[in-house]
Amino acid sequence: MKSSNYNTCYSLPKLTTCVVGGGNSAHVLIPFLSTAGHTVNLLTRRPNDWNKVVTCDVTSMENQVIKKFTGTCDKISSDPNDVIPDADAIILCMPVHQYRNALDRLAPFIDKSKVNFL
């Protein structure tokens, strides 16, 4: 039986993704999404604390860096109007109990004329 490689079997669309929140998961997702060819925007309360280039270090149990992944944010903002309308996908990187408030804040800026993934 021939094994298949998911990455070579399907041509995945390049999306504009908005990462909402600035925690650890955002620091991991941004490099992976960016290096996969997606445009990444970031909505955060503290945009001035971020650099456009984000690096994620994969470390061993001994805290030795095994590999580095680096990606870029196209836009970084605290204003949903700057980053949400262009988004094909929105990823919430925050505690689950904050989802409802975040979605209430984002809803007016989501482009309802296209399919969005949350």
Image (cartoon, rainbow, N blue to C red):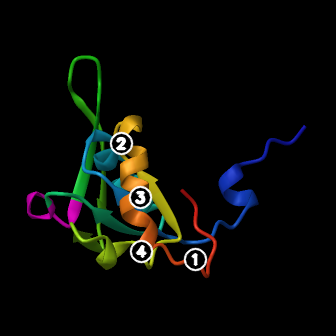
Residue 117: give x, y in percent of width and height: 58, 61
Q: Nearer the viewer, mark 3 or mark 4?
A: 3
Task: Tell me which label, 3 or 2, sits earlier in the chain.
Answer: 2
Task: Tell me whether the residue at label 3 lies in contact with that at label 2, contact meaning CB atoms closer than 8 angstroms.
Answer: no
Question: Which of marks 1 and 3 precedes in the sequence?
Answer: 3
Q: Is residue 19 magenta?
A: no
Gap between marks 3 and 1, in whole Å? 15 Å
The mark closer to the camera, 3 or 2, is 3
Q: Residue furthest bottom?
A: 113
As measured in the structure, the alpha-carbon distance from the residue carrying label 3 to the one carrying label 2 is: 10 Å
- Which residue is at the front of the view, 30 or 8? 30
Picture quadrant where residue 118 is located: bottom right
Per the image, the residue denoted by label 3 is: 104
| Circles 2 and 1 in contact, beta carbons < 8 Å | no
Residue 48 lies in the magenta-colored region: yes
- Say left or right for 53 vs 13: left
93 up-or-down from 84: above or below: above
Disc 3 residue type? Asp
Q: Which mark is residue 112?
A: 1
Q: Is residue 32 shown left or right of residue 76?
A: right
| Comes first in the chain, label 2 or label 1 | 2
Per the image, label 1 sits on a secondary structure element best described as: loop
| Residue 86 higher or lower than 18, as above or below | below
Sequence-first disc among 3 and 4: 3
Q: Disc 3 on helix, strand or loop? A: helix
Give the residue pinned by disc 4: 109
Could you tell me how far apart the alpha carbons at marks 4 and 1 are, in whole angstroms? 9 Å
| Image position of 9 with respect to 85: above or below | above
User: Which label is found at residue 12?
Assistant: none
Magenta stretch in the rendered image = 47-53
Q: Which residue is mark 2?
A: 98
Q: Amino acid at mark 2?
A: Gln
